[in-house]
Image (tube, rainbow, N blue to C red):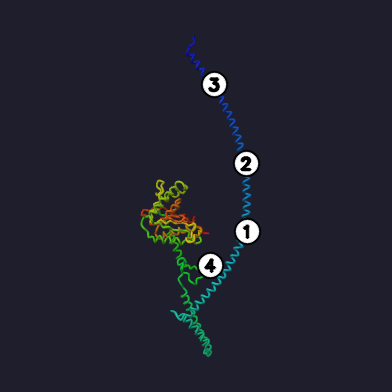
Amino acid sequence: MEGDPGMDSVTQLGEGEARSLRTRLVDLEALLGIANDEIRSAENTVAAAMGQVEELLEMSKTVEEECTTAVERVEQDVMKGVEKDFADLRVKHDDHHESRWEEYHRTLRLETDALKAGRKRRRAERLRMTLNVASTEDGSPAVFNFTMQTLHDLRSSSAINNLSDITKIGVCLATGAAGAVGLFATYQYIKKKSSRTRSGSLVANPDNHLAEEEVLQGHEIFRHDRQEQGEMIDHAEKFLKLMNTRRSIRFYSKEDVPLSVIMTAVRTACTAPSGAHLQPWTFVIVQNQQAKERIRDVVEREEQLNYDRRMRRSWVKDATPMVGDLHRDGRVAKPYLSEAPYLVVMMKQNYRVDASTGDRQEHYYVEQSCGIAAGMLICALHNAGLVTLTSTPMGAESAIRNILNRPANEKVYLLMPVGYPSSDATVPKRTSENRRRSESDTIAVV
């Protein structure tokens, strides 16, 4: 049977594709061989690089150990030099301090002796002047003078020698009794004349510096009105009860408050103790509505950044219950900065510049001093029936200082809105369990 031409064509076509596939397979095998060679070459390169890395690591460790040893050696040399310098300085300081201490005590003894002598002279002078008074309301000096004159007359009189012994004894007893009465009356007179009202604090009347007050090394006698124990306990408990009702308020009435009350509270804060008594603060009382709104605007913008980026999430979580619905939908709002009738901006001063000489006076313990003054302001405002809140405008300090046109040596320490609470004001709910930390956690008596 003769072959089919169609089948021959198919057979030829299949053989052609097979040859083509075999050719491609050979090419692929060749490429695979080349790839394997490159892989082996890369592996060798990597192995060589790893060896170099290990060598570098070893060199790095060696260098690090040498650097550590060198640093330790330098530190030891420096410490030895510092200890020696410190020891020499300590010896010089002790010698200088001892000499100055001895000089100070010598001067102090001389001044004390002079004061004692002056005090004795003043007392003697007061007694002499008192005894020279002719008469008083109770006639005390007159009684004393009469008694002394009687004793003198009897001693100089020859008539007493003619009296019997019993009569002499009686005269002596009568004269002694009269003298005792005169001395007692004179003592009461001197006591009444020398008594005067004493202030419980020199600050209450700083100009009450009487001539007879002892003054030593720039100090003066402090007169303290001590309370009875029962009165002391009662006052302490009443003050605790008052302060235990204080709350931080974020919702304010726009009702006006007398400026004099705010001024008095700020004056009270200014009586706070401070480092070296330099009083490193300025209280700026803002009542201008435009200024309050500008401050609120910059504070809210910066606080938004604080909550979004700067603050730790733990702070945001802990502060959220305090602000309530003010930060609705993640937007920071501080309406109290503009709604309260007054905004007290407490500025701290790290230094002071004398306006007349331009000299710079450094301040000390600024943070602590301002913190004490702020606490006293809070107490004074609460005692006056007003409410407030302490707000720290992190990031907005410079802008607030510019708004208030304050000098460069002043930095914003606190913002304190002051006024009456609004009729719908709310505060975080407190129970007896979470109102205050336990005394065992906050108070220790040793």
Please name the amino acid that badge 3 sits on. Thr
Please name the amino acid that badge 4 sits on. Gln
The disc, 1 or 4, on the residue closer to the chain's N-terminal end is 1
Q: Position of residue 282 (x, y in %)?
A: 45, 58
Please name the amino acid that badge 2 sits on. Met
Q: How far is disc 4 from disc 2 in space, using C-alphas?
A: 68 Å
Q: Which mark is residue 88?
A: 1
- Per the image, the residue denoted by label 2 is 59
Q: How far is disc 1 from disc 4 in space, using C-alphas?
A: 32 Å
**Badge 1 density bin: few <14, some 14–19, many ≥20, Cα 10 Å:** few
The disc, 3 or 4, on the residue closer to the chain's N-terminal end is 3
**Badge 4 density bin: few <14, some 14–19, many ≥20, Cα 10 Å:** few
Q: Position of residue 16 (x, y in %)?
A: 51, 18
The disc, 4 or 2, on the residue closer to the chain's N-terminal end is 2
- Per the image, the residue denoted by label 3 is 23
Q: In the displayed structure, would residue 152 be above or below residue 44?
A: below
Q: How far is disc 3 from disc 2 in space, using C-alphas?
A: 54 Å
The disc, 3 or 2, on the residue closer to the chain's N-terminal end is 3
Q: Position of residue 135 (x, y in %)?
A: 45, 81
**Secondary structure of residue under mark 1:** helix
Q: How far is disc 3 from disc 4 in space, using C-alphas?
A: 114 Å
